Amino acid sequence: MNLAVDVGNTRVKVAVFENDSVVDLVVFDKRKIISEIKKIVKSYSITQGIIANVASISEKKMAQLKKIVKFHVLSTQSKLAFTNLYKTPNTLGVDRIALVAAAIKQYPNKNVLIVDAGTCITFDFVNAKKEYLGGAISPGIKLRYKALNSFTANLPLIASLKLENFIGKNTEESIVSGVLNGVVKEIDGVILGYKEQYLDLTVVLTGGDTNFLSKQLKSSIFANQNFLLHGLNEILKLNAYK
């Protein structure tokens, strides 16, 4: 069995794979990563793992993790099943690499746009020739709320994902309308822009805000919150320990 570990800013998401199927999925606080990985390894016959470390894990903790499981640490030097045409390949985030790996596995010979809606909203495009061309990075919903609160004197911090009124009747409703409608219109607009260039386009939505956005977007999409973990499993197969 394979272990795919996605380390975010505050949370860690882990999937246990048997071939291409997820047999268990666990989410926990980043501070508990050592103890939680040990629990998983005791429950399953894990042969190897892969870790995508978007946030910072200390060298000490990484060394401890490698004693528990034979981990491949995803980087721009990892073997990939696609051609990376990003102009600065060494700056490409490992989360984005994993998303593209999932796209070419699940939608072979397709033009695929992956929208990852989390702390940031990332757009990543891979064409039918398995060439990754790049994409875009934009502030996510929570980040926009925090920016309005942090960089103004009087606007409150909002956390709502309920879009009830297009016209805000008070300050809180106005912030919710501005942020949520802005994000939805932005994503729909970006998708439309890609569709104008690539008529045969598959769109995948993933990330923490998937459930909310999948109900709001006009475009036809495939929603999969665990898309990145599937990509990690595919990369692990190419970089498997012999």
Image (cartoon, rainbow, N blue to C red):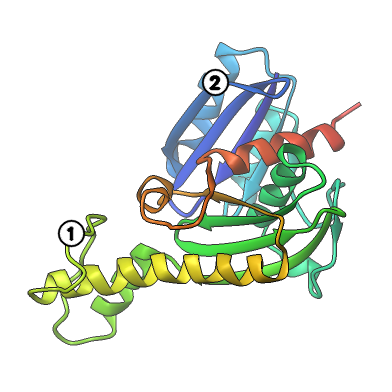
The crowding category of the residue bearing disc 1, from other C-alpha atoms within 10 Å (few below 14, some 14 to 19, many at least 20), is: few
Q: CA distance from mark 1 to mark 2?
A: 41 Å
Give the quarter of the image for residue 102. Answer: top right
- Disc 1 marks a residue whose amino acid type is Glu
Where residue 91 appears, as percent x and y from the top left, is 73, 69
Report the residue marked by disc 1. Answer: 164
Give the quarter of the image for residue 66. Answer: top right
Q: Which mark is residue 40?
A: 2
Q: Say if 176 sits above or below 98 in the image.
A: below
The residue under the point 39% across, 53% down is: 213
The crowding category of the residue bearing disc 2, from other C-alpha atoms within 10 Å (few below 14, some 14 to 19, many at least 20), is: some
Q: State left or right for residue 173 relative to residue 204.
A: left
Q: State left or right for residue 154 relative to residue 33.
A: left
Give the quarter of the image for residue 232. Answer: top right
Q: Secondary structure at mark 2?
A: helix
Q: Secondary structure at mark 1?
A: loop
